[in-house]
Amino acid sequence: MNSERLGYLISLYLDGGLAPAEKAELESALLSSASVRSQFWSETKLHEQLRVVEQEVYASDPPKLRTRIVCALYPMRHSEAILRGSTGH
Amino acid sequence: MDHSGSSSPNQHTLRVQSLFVQHQSQLRWFIQSLAPDFATADDVLQECFLTISAKAHEFELESNFLAWSRSIARFKILALHRDQSRRPAMLSEEVLEALILSAPYSDSETTEKERSAIEKLRLCLEKLGPAAREIINLRYFSQWGPSEISRIRECSMNAVNVTLARSRAALRRCVENSTSTASL
């Protein structure tokens, strides 16, 4: 398995999106090689760091936090209108 | 066990708890890698803290805290795996054990290196295109999964999965080559 494919499968795993066949493919690769396991830990480190960064950025910047909350609550076309102040939300 | 000298059992527990705080990021990485759902990983981390506090008297301060705390986390992760409802999202027990054995240990410069890596990642995130940045925000700040993100963004789940995978790959390349000025 090439590194790009492995990265994609680990990405799906981290997001809970592995289909059974993909899960079997990833598990087989992880059991087969120490370098694959090393890439696994490297990919999951980025996952952990992204969580830390995102929490820090928005905790320290309330306007950005408001943007994120609105975008999270409404579909894109509605959230843009809300952030422009053109609706009653 | 280090209950000698001026260290009372209570002080000992506090020192062990402060070691937990010091190693929390490493332990969360370990747990989240093996139980990737954020809420589940947070629950396991919290349970580890409670167990570590309860068993603090068993820990010798001169020994390896991360190894000890990981052994506690390992039991909790394997217990999770025995819960049938959680099993589909987790790797097989054989794979979990292989990963646990291969989990890297950071050196004594952990905190400094960690901060530096976080700063590089922060700069790299600014280079992501707006759509990818938005999806990363929804995944890591709002902590929603691909299905919720696809509903919010009104796009397919496959598109979300591909964007997340490509964004992570681009961020990895950027962090590894932090002098690069190329736009992602």
Image: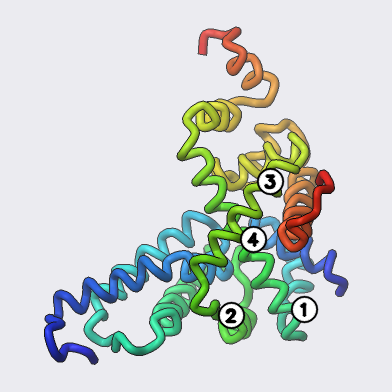
Look at mark 1 in the image and give the residue it sits on: A29
Q: In which quadrant of the rendered view does residue A34 lie?
A: bottom right
Judged left or right of residue B57, residue A82 is: right
- Callout in the foreground (1, 4): 4
Residues tagged by mark 3 and mark 2 found on one chain of the structure:
yes
Residue A18 image position (x, y, % from top left): 71, 61
Q: CA distance from mark 4 to mark 3?
A: 12 Å
Look at mark 3 in the image and give the residue it sits on: B125
Judged left or right of residue A74, residue A11 is: right
Indicate which disc, 3 or 2, sits on the residue closer to the N terminus: 2
**Mark 2: amino acid:** Ala
Q: Which mark is residue B103?
A: 2
- Callout in the foreground (1, 3): 3
Residue situated furthest front in the rendering: B179
Residues tagged by mark 2 and mark 1 found on one chain of the structure:
no
- Callout in the foreground (4, 3): 3
Residue situated furthest right in the rendering: A2
Indicate which disc, 1 or 4, sits on the residue closer to the N terminus: 1
Q: Is residue B40 above or below residue B74?
A: above
Q: Is residue A48 visible?
A: no
Look at mark 4 in the image and give the residue it sits on: A46
Q: Residues within 10 Å of mark 4 (few under 14, many from 20)?
A: many
Tell me the subunit letter for badge 2. Answer: B
Q: In which quadrant of the rendered view does residue B43 lie?
A: bottom left
- Callout in the foreground (3, 2): 3
Tell me the subunit letter for badge 3. Answer: B
The answer to whether marks 4 and 3 mark residues whose Cβ atoms lie closer than 8 Å is no
* Residue ID at (33%, 68%): B49
* Residue ID at (63%, 72%): B91
